[in-house]
Amino acid sequence: MNQPAELDIQEPAFIAQSKLKQPRVLAIANQKGGVGKTTTTVNLATAMAATHKKVLIIDLDPQGNASTGLGIERSARQLTTYDLLLGETGLLDAIKPTIVPGLSIVPSSVDLSGAELELIDLAEREYRLAKAIRNAGQGYDYVLIDCPPALGLLTLNALCAADAVLVPLQCEYYALEGLSHLVRTIERVKRAFNSDLEIQGVVLTMYDRRNNLSDMVAADVREHFGDKVYRTVIPRNVRVSEAPSHGKPVLVYDWRCAGSQAYIHLASEMLRRERKATA
């Protein structure tokens, strides 16, 4: 994504219009692919729904993996985030229920890959998603946005709509370098587009306790980001990898496995953090 120009941009009037309780909006973002964004989005949302929170996932990745992982067939995706961003449908019309009680999704399709070019000439292009959520998201406690692995206009829409960013971070050698780049981007977006944006937390994914590198990366990340890093880590787990092929979150596919238990603990830790942040 080109660095947002540091302009004196006024927030659109729609942001202050609604008097109804708005959901807490979290963008799940990292510009690197394969770090567990979608897996974290789907399973964290499932665990939150199990605590009787009403949760909506917005699948903003053209690959549509969050939609597939929740069993939404491509033939059933008549209205998607593409239609939502282009203003061709409203949020409520695009929402689909999932197999998880209390969890819904706005699915994605490959059409979304062309949305960035189509958005360029539209008014308030950075705020299209924010406006859709503000106008019709009041029935949800949380909205989780699964971002694509790039810092383009789609991710910018997510960051402008979000209250905070949750960053999944793979325990690998270049993790800190990528995270530092993302943090700089978030700061630029905060200055230019969304003054309330903050980093909600960093969650370490694909942790392998047999690998010394995982421990080294975890220690480095905690040293740099302190309490922003969750105590819960998500381990490498075969059942987590298998679950999407069955169209299920791993918590539904095998709730006893180590991956499921980790996401349950992560949801508990996150909700405690959220209660403090919104108190």
Image (cartoon, rainbow, N blue to C red):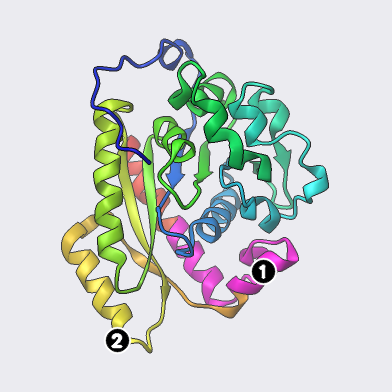
Q: Are marks 2 and 1 in contact (CB under 8 Å)?
A: no
Q: Is residue 28 left or right of residue 135?
A: left
Residue at x-position 73% and y-position 39%: 96
Q: Is residue 140 left or right of residue 220?
A: right
Observer-nearest of 127 and 17 = 127
The spot of residue 35 in percent (x, y) is 45, 64
Residue labelled with disc 1: 243
Residue 206's place in the image compared with 106, above or below, is below
Q: Earlier in the sequence, mark 2 or mark 1?
A: 2
| Range drawn in magenta | 240-267
Q: Main secondary structure of the magenta part?
A: helix
Looking at the rendered image, the quarter that the C terminus falls into is top left
The spot of residue 85 in percent (x, y) is 58, 28
Residue at x-position 37% and y-position 84%: 209
Q: Give residue 212's mark.
A: 2
Q: Residue furthest left?
A: 223
